[in-house]
Image (cartoon, rainbow, N blue to C red):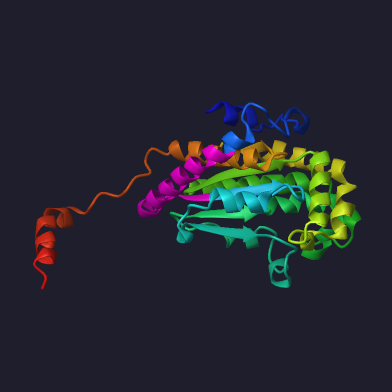
Amino acid sequence: MSKFQKQLKASSKSKLKDFPTHIDNISPEEAKKELKQVRKSIANIQEVMYAHNKYSVLICLQGMDTAGKDSLIREVFKDFNARGVVVQSYKTPSFRELQHDYLWRHYIALPERGKFTVFNRTHYENVLVTRVHPEYILQENIPKITEVKDIPKDFWRNRYQQINNFEHHIQQNGTIILKFYLHLSKGEQKSRLLRRLDKEDHNWKFSPGDLKERKRWEEYMSYYEEAIQHTSKPDAPWYVIPADNKEICRYLVAQIILEELKKRKDIKYPDLPKDIEKHIACYRKELENEK
């Protein structure tokens, strides 16, 4: 495990205040340069994974508004073959999605063997946004819950266990799960929101709701911390990534992905079937003599 992985990997006792939102032991320029090589290496491994056809990779990205999820996806997966990665963004559940349990829409979007799927926002919205806004739970039409006061005290702890079970199940069946919380400071979010307002090509992203949610920053931090503590497991770890600098953030995520993939020593091109290998010379000769 690299120093970055060890430093940024969360546990059941982790406190968000103990993780940096910015690190100085690598410069943005160095990070940008290193990312170019790292993302090529990840893309190369995915090509082998596709042929190997045993593993899939689920990348989960969470973070406050302006944390840089969209640009991270664009930069980290830039060198991928288009068939090798799918990005799934989650917004308010649709009517159809609400006719199922809260994990259904995530389950049907899981990556195929040999491919990556990136969840831009994830199933963790169901234990984060719904904690700040418990009235959202009422839309799920859960038996015996018709008002917020009906939500039982153990409701959230049960959801953490359901999520752990979900992730453990898909991990046992070949999905490599890596979860990244982009740890942005409140001051940096303010700067980014102001820039968003000032730039014509960015201000379309702004919503007054961003400011309302910002006022509840401490609540979000508390619930993020609780969710990470309950769901960072050996088979589905959380990494708390400094996100005040986007170049460094992207590099750290890419480097951790690469290091995790390198641990799977069995990922390799499949052996050529013996009946084909035996006749390779014949096939070559047939092609060379083609008129």
**Residue in the picture at 23% in, 52% down:** 272
In the depicted view, which residue is nearer to us: 150 or 30? 30
x%, y% of residue 78? 52, 53
- Rendering coords of residue 111 (x, y %): 52, 57
Q: Give the percent coordinates (x, y) of residue 21.
A: 73, 34
The structure residue drawn at horizontal position 47% and vertical position 54%, both measured from the top left corner, is 80
Where is the C terminus found, in terms of image quarters?
bottom left
- Residue situated in front as seen by the camera: 4 or 59: 4
Q: In the image shown, does 271 or 199 lie closer to the viewer?
A: 199
Residue 202 placement, left or right of 10: right
Magenta span has 28? Answer: no
| Magenta-highlighted residues | 32-57
Relative image position of residue 196 (x, y in whole percent): 79, 54
Q: Is residue 162 visible?
A: no
Left-right relation of 179 to 13: left
For the image shown, how many numbered marks are present on the structure? 0
- Dividing the picture into quadrants, the one containing residue 142 is bottom right
Identity of the residue drawn at 88% across and 59% down: 208
Task: Out of 270 and 283, give the one closest to the viewer.
Answer: 283
Q: Main secondary structure of the magenta part?
A: helix
Q: Is residue 229 visible?
A: yes
Image vertical order of residue 37 relative to residue 78, above or below: above
Q: Quadrant of residue 245?
A: top right
Q: What residue is at 75 percent from the left and 31 percent from the top?
A: 15
